[in-house]
Amino acid sequence: MILPSFLHIADSSIGLSLDSSKRESLKAHIKHSLLFEERLLLTDSQLIDNKNLRFLLFEDKEFSSLFSKDNLSIALRNVIDIRQSSSELPSEYIYDPTIDEIVKGFISWKKCSWENSSNINVQKRYAQTIELDNLTKSVNIERYSLGSVGAMFTDDMLDVLSRGNVMDKIGEKFANQVSDLVIEKRLKQSGEINPRGGVGIAYFKNELGAELFNRGFAKEWKQNEKFILDISQAPYLTALPKVFNANPIYGAMHKPHIDIMNGKSEIKVIGKDEYYRTNLLQYETGINLLSVKSIEKLRNSDRFRKFRDSLNRYDGTESGLRTAMFSFDEYKIAIDDEILKCFPFLKERRTINREIMRPAELLYDAPNYGGVMLSTLSIFSVSFTGMNPLSLGLGLLGLIGAKIFSGLKERTEHRTDFEKRILIDKLEKDKSNKITGEYNVVSNEDDFRKSTHTVMLSSVV
């Protein structure tokens, strides 16, 4: 079973989504995630409100062609209420709505940030859903209930409020009062659409303070408001991924909140960007040059499959950790090599060297070909040195071939490292943004995820 990976870095509240100068950065981060995850998960609200993502889907045909049923799922809510123009009329409820109907619902409740634009053309453009309609037709659609997400958030928030460290911070009496108000609100919210009942993070931001004031806890709320709002971010960020049993891909700004939800799970790092041998994968310029074909090639490679298998089979042992780290490193090397091929000033030299390298491989393998050996040697004699190697004597063939092959392989590795250093120097001079991050594995069998992909966004947000 393939677990999706929820893309927190596509949230509409961060700079990658809001700042038009960050479009290429957002593209690089999504490509970066596609290189490592089996399937990404985006929500309807992310798609609708993320202006940079929508611009890329509409204007960049190469980017929009990245996605398929194999690598992307979109979570659409199972019901949307569309507020009527007159407040006296009840909302219209549409079940299993299309993305277009969800957009109309968002607009009716003024939930879209782009509605605040002073440019009427911007509002009209994003009210249209051409690129979203096209995307939802070509990828997996997963339905979810807002009630289930709210219930998950409420369960986890009550759990956080009951923890000893939280009670020590805000006081047991105050923590219990906040929990009681959350439970009361939950009961009021329960109904046909939301049978379990639940509150959203908006309750903590907009309503909780007034209710605590009425209960005589105004002083305590003033002292602890920021802390409570901070800890509420943790269950908010993890609620929907938990509903879908998804691994989270989150940014540096999310990490403190995600850590709160780790509980007793032991998180182990299997790789950081400084662990990369060449660091090419850090550079957005290189990642963005990878074509759809290149990304598909990498995702279909044995190294990608071994890497994913090492995560899925991780059992918390030291040997399992070593296997995951090794496969992670090997796969990153393959990505580096693919990035190198994208730079024109390196292509010609690499082609020439491959033509030299192939005959050396044939020489090394010649003794194993049996009756095919002479034709193999004939190819070698024409394309490698122009000499007939039969004059060297068959007894020395394997030894000499091995030495030549080993020497060429070593020089090729040095050449490749040299090319990478040249490229890194060029990328540094061009001031290409970097993606830094780490990959973690979770050892707790009961945890809602098996791996987390931490993408540090401090340089681009």
Image (cartoon, rainbow, N blue to C red):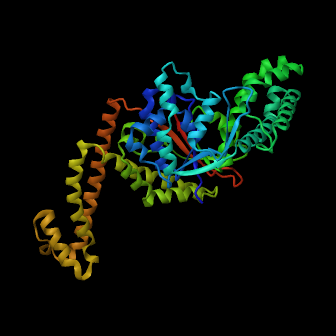
Pick the quarter of the image with the N terminus.
Answer: bottom right
Which residue corresponds to the image point at 38% horizontal and 44% vertical from the top-left?
62
- Where residue 184 appears, as percent x and y from the top left, is 86, 34
Would you say residue 112 is visible in this rendering? yes
63 displayed left or right of 256? left
- Where residue 102 appears, as percent x and y from the top left, is 60, 39
16 displayed left or right of 209? left
- Where residue 430 appears, as percent x and y from the top left, is 32, 30
* Residue 256 sits above or below residue 395 on the image: above
Q: Residue furthest bottom?
A: 371
226 displayed left or right of 253? right
305 displayed left or right of 232? left
Would you say residue 278 is visible in this rendering? no
| Numbered marks: total | 0
- Where residue 19 appears, as percent x and y from the top left, is 48, 26
* Residue 58 sits above or below residue 225 on the image: below
Q: Nearer the viewer, residue 230 or 209?
A: 209
Quarter where residue 27 is shown: top left
